[in-house]
Amino acid sequence: MNKKILLVGSVFGLLTVVIGAFGAHALEEILLQNGRADTFETAVKYQGIHALALVLLGILSEKLNSSLIRYAAILMVIGILIFSGSLYILSIILEGVIFVSLEIFWKYWINSLVTFS
């Protein structure tokens, strides 16, 4: 088993539980005020599904020694960060109070990906 993939999947799984609990209790008023509780729930759900998929990829890497598994894991991590991350941000900001520029957001992620590789 690829222990790095298992570790990353496990960490994302742990964060799914922590973020979900934090959203259900500490952020409940903000999410209801913004009308974004369903958006936050979607982000948590997709993060959890992808965390489980990462763990399964780690287990599968024992049977198949392929670089494709590594690339699939990297793409899943990127997907979690971009998709769930953007939904988390969208859920907790008030429209008109905090403006997040998509250009700056995408430049940040692209720069992170380039330096990560």
Image (cartoon, helix red, strand yellow):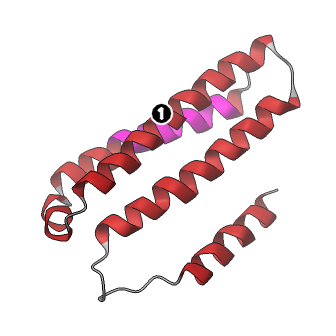
Q: Which quadrant holds residue 104?
A: bottom right
Image height check: is 22 above or below 96? Answer: above
Crowd around label 1: few <14 · some 14–19 · many ≥20 (10 Å): some
Image height check: is 117 above or below 5? Answer: below
Which stretch did the figure color magenta? 5-17
Q: Which quadrant holds residue 2?
A: top right
Residue 100 position in % (x across, y down): 46, 82
Taking the magenta stretch, the answer to whether it contains residue 96 is no
Q: Residue at x 56, y 55 (%)?
A: 81
Q: Which quadrant holds residue 8?
A: top right
Q: 5 or 93, which lies in front?
A: 93
Taking the magenta stretch, the answer to whether it contains residue 15 is yes
Residue at mark 1: 49
Image height check: is 25 above or below 65? Answer: below
Query: Majority secondary structure of the magenta segment?
Result: helix
Q: Quadrant of the N terminus?
A: top right
Left or right placement of residue 73 versus residue 79 in this view? right
Q: Residue at x 51, y 39 (%)?
A: 11
Q: 19 or 39, which lies in front?
A: 39
Left or right placement of residue 48 versus residue 116 in this view? left
Q: Residue at x 58, y 76 (%)?
A: 105
Q: Residue at x 25, y 61 (%)?
A: 36
Residue 78 position in % (x across, y down): 64, 52
Q: Quadrant of the C terminus?
A: bottom right
Q: 4 or 103, which lies in front?
A: 103
Residue 40 position in % (x across, y down): 32, 54
Q: Mark 1: which amino acid?
A: Ile
Left or right placement of residue 43 versus residue 60 in this view? left
- Tally the numbered discs: 1
- At numbered mark 1, what does the secondary structure look like: helix, strand or loop? helix
